[in-house]
Amino acid sequence: MRVALLPGDGIGPEVVAEARRVLDAVTGGALAFDEALIGGAAIDATGTALPDDTTDACRRADAVLLGAVGGPKWDDPLSPVRPEQGLLAIRRALGLFANLRPVAPFPALADASPLKPERLAGVDLLVVRELTGGIYFGVKGTYGQPGRERARDVCSYTTEEIERIVRVGAEMARARRGRLTSVDKANVLETSRLWRRVATRVVAAEFPDVSLEHVLVDACAMHLVTNPARFDVIVTENMFGDILTDEAAVLAGSIGVLPSASLGAPNGVGQTRMGLYEPIHGSAPDLAGRGVANPVGTILSAALLLRHSLGLEREARLVERAVAEALADGARTADLGGSLSTREMTDAVMGRLEVRTAAAVAV
Ligand code: NAD
Ligand code: IPM
Ligand code: MN
């Protein structure tokens, strides 16, 4: 089994190196790793944010683990090449239209969230974010004379794009608590009205056992912090999902602990599929190079990789349990109010993993 590693920029390489150690440990060294350039690191080395070699390495792999891209060095708004283009391009090239962002706060981290503990009780939600359409990928450009320009980003969705992401959301809801919330801005946007019609039809026709509600995105942003336990699965378009999941990170105590899985077309129940796994956070330029970033979001992304792309459910659970136990034992990086380094935090997780793995072997 082969995993492509795309460390990227800023804290990306720091957290990916730690997640790699965890993958090595839990699989007993059974994975082959291929490291490739993306983002600013790729621009510096090759002039483009996604070199062909990187796409090839991803296509050869069973799964991709990515850190983060971007940073102040490449932020000039007039630059024709940007690190973020690399990330968007690899998602698109691999057909990864479904981005799963689970938010199930660890009870041990309740004190790290600014929300009242009673608001966090029972929170276990999954955001299914559409990842290869919408305003991110529509026609865009800046037109006109310098000083009097007009810029545009067109948001468009096809029926088929909406159908397939709603199906993913409904399938996930069916396997969980049976409740799907479709989030849109149908009171204003044409794309949202199509989204709402398609979601209603698909769920009624194919998922009679799933209950569907429609919530406007502005109200959803409020419900996420006032009553987050009301949500099971949220399905939404690309940019709404991006914004709502950074907000949802507040429930978990830090954006540093949230993982994600980006998947393509399902190829049957119980089967593995190619996927790209990354924490939801960015390159954290304020922390880069200091060895203090929280590696948990990337380690939990590696667990999702084991589950969805390698079919290693037992190993995925071992990693998730080791993280939960390390946090319950009080292991904390600075974002969670602690003082552990990136490596020490990973060591705490690996310590719990060894205990578990040894116990499993003994049984
Ligand atoms: P960010 O997520 O990098 O940082 C936001 C805040 O969260 C910062 O205070 C940062 O220190 C903190 N943070 C993030 N990850 C953390 C971790 N693992 N441990 C502890 N604290 C953490 O978002 P930003 O500052 O808006 O963006 C910085 C750059 O990252 C930009 O260039 C942006 O485009 C890029 N970005 C990339 C991705 C990605 O590659 N998937 C995602 C988001 C942002
Ligand atoms: C994310 C990031 C990316 C996105 C950027 C860096 C392109 O914010 O993965 O959440 O908006 O999808
Ligand atoms: Mn984001």
Image (tube, rainbow, N blue to C red):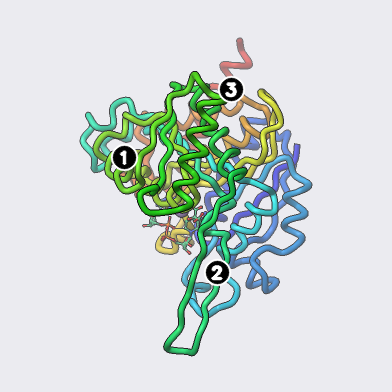
Tell me the residue at 60%/57% (across/down).
Answer: 87
Q: According to the image, label 3 marks what residue? A: 357
Q: CA distance from mark 3 to mark 1?
A: 37 Å
Circle number at residue 140: 2
The relative height of residue 194 versus residue 303 in the rendered view (above or below) is below
Quadrant in the rendering for residue 287: bottom left
Q: CA distance from mark 2 to mark 3?
A: 51 Å
Q: CA distance from mark 1 to mark 2?
A: 31 Å
The reply, left or right, for residue 338 in relation to residue 37 is left
Tell me the residue at 67%/38% (across/down).
Answer: 265
For marks 2 and 3, the one nearer the N-term is 2
Tell me the residue at 52%/81% (across/down).
Answer: 143
Q: Secondary structure at mark 1?
A: helix
Amino acid type, callout 2 = Lys
Circle number at residue 224: 1
Amino acid type, callout 3 = Thr
Q: Secondary structure at mark 2?
A: strand
The reply, left or right, for residue 211 in relation to residue 156 is left
Q: Residues within 10 Å of mark 3 (few under 14, many from 20)?
A: some
Q: Is residue 343 visible?
A: no
Quadrant in the rendering for residue 164: top right
Q: Position of residue 266 (x, y in %)?
A: 67, 33
For marks 1 and 2, the one nearer the N-term is 2
Q: Position of residue 121 (x, y in %)?
A: 28, 27
Quadrant position of the C terminus in the picture: top right
Mark 1 and mark 2 in contact? Answer it, CB < 8 Å: no
Amino acid type, callout 1 = Leu
